[in-house]
C-alpha cells in the first residue's frame, strides 16, 4: 500500500514530466510548473530549439529531453536520464503529447473519407504514449509511495461539433484509461485524472482555427470568452497539488462553461 504522505508533496518538491512540452499547450503547462518551483522534464520530439530555450528559463530545474512517447524504449531511457540528472524520482506525469494535428475542421477528414491510419496515428501517440510514460515511471512511484498522472483530454466528448474523429476517439480512449488506471493504481497512492479543454486561444495547434470560430465559441460560453492556455495550465496544477489528494478517476472540463457535466 502507498504511503498517503506522498500525496502531500508540495509542487516545488516535485519532479514533473510534461510530454510534448516544447511548444503549444505543453509549453504553457511546463512553464506553470516551473513558476511554482517544480523541477520539470521538458519532453519534445521535433521542437528542440524551443524546448532547450524553455529549459534555459529555469537553470537547474528544467531539462529538455527528446523522446518519441510512442516508443517505450525511448520513454524508459528518458525517465532514467531525468531521474539520474535530478537525483530523484518522477512524481508527476502530464500526458500532453499530441501527434501532428491542426485544429481546423475544414481540413479534417469526414466520415466518407476517414482512414483507419488517421485514427491509428492518434491512438499511437495519445494512448500508447500515456501507457509508456506510466509504465516507465511506475516502479519509482510505487517505491516512493505514490504519484500523480494527469492526462490531457478534450471537451469534444460532450460537444462533438467538428469532425475531429481521430483526435476525439483517441482522447476518449485516454479517458477510459484514466479511469481504469485510477482504479488499478489507487492502492499504490497514485492518482490519475484528466483535464479536458476546448479550443484554446491560442496554441500552435489552434493557430489554424478561423477567427469566426473563436468568436462563436466565446459567445456560447457563460464567461463570453475563449479559455487561454495559461488558464488551462492552472487547472493542471490543481491535480498535482496536495489539495487534490483525494481526487482520482475524474475528468475536469476547463472551457469557460461551454460544456456542463
Image (cartoon, grey):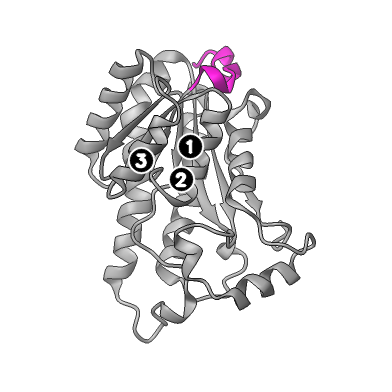
- Kindly give the residue lying farthest to the left in the view shown: 73
Residue 72 at x, y percent in the picture: 24, 39
Q: Nearer the viewer, residue 237 or 181?
A: 237
- Kindly give the residue lying farthest to the bottom in the view shown: 112
Q: Is disc 3 surrounded by few (<14), some (14 to 19) or many (20+) residues within 10 Å?
A: many
- Residue occupied by mark 2: 26
- For the question of whether residue 41 can be seen, the reply is no
Up-down: is 217 above or below 253? below
Q: Is disc 1 surrounded by few (<14), some (14 to 19) or many (20+) residues within 10 Å?
A: many
- 82 displayed left or right of 235: left
Up-down: is 155 above or below 130? below
- Residue occupied by mark 3: 51
- For the question of whether residue 73 can be seen, the reply is yes
The residue shown at (38%, 52%) is 126
The residue shown at (53%, 75%) is 162
Q: Nearer the viewer, mark 3 or mark 2?
A: 3
Amino acid at each position: 500500500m502507498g504511503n498517503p504522505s506522498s500525496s502531500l508533496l508540495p509542487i516545488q518538491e516535485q519532479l514533473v514530466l510534461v510530454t510534448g512540452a516544447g511548444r503549444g499547450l505543453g509549453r504553457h503547462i511546463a512553464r506553470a510548473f516551473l513558476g511554482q518551483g517544480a523541477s520539470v522534464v521538458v519532453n519534445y520530439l521535433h521542437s528542440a530549439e524551443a524546448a532547450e530555450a524553455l529549459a534555459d528559463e529555469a537553470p537547474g530545474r528544467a531539462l529538455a529531453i527528446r523522446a518519441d512517447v510512442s516508443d517505450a524504449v525511448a520513454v524508459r531511457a528518458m525517465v532514467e536520464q531525468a531521474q539520474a540528472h535530478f537525483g530523484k524520482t518522477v512524481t508527476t506525469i502530464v500526458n500532453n503529447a499530441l501527434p501532428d494535428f491542426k485544429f481546423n475542421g475544414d481540413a479534417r477528414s469526414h466520415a466518407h473519407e476517414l482512414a483507419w491510419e488517421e485514427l491509428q496515428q492518434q491512438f499511437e501517440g495519445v494512448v500508447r504514449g500515456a501507457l509508456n510514460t506510466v509504465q516507465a515511471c511506475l516502479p519509482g512511484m510505487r517505491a516512493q509511495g505514490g504519484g500523480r498522472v494527469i492526462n490531457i483530454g478534450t471537451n469534444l466528448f460532450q460537444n462533438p461539433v467538428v469532425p475531429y474523429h481521430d483526435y476525439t476517439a483517441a482522447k476518449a480512449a485516454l479517458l477510459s484509461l484514466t479511469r481504469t488506471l485510477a482504479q488499478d493504481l489507487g492502492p499504490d497512492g497514485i492518482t490519475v485524472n484528466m483535464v479536458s479543454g476546448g479550443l484554446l486561444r491560442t496554441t500552435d495547434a489552434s493557430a489554424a482555427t478561423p477567427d469566426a470560430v473563436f468568436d462563436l465559441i466565446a459567445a456560447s460560453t457563460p464567461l463570453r470568452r475563449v479559455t487561454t492556455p495559461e488558464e488551462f495550465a492552472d487547472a493542471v496544477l490543481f491535480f498535482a497539488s496536495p489539495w487534490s489528494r483525494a481526487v482520482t478517476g475524474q475528468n475536469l472540463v476547463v472551457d469557460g462553461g461551454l460544456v456542463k457535466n
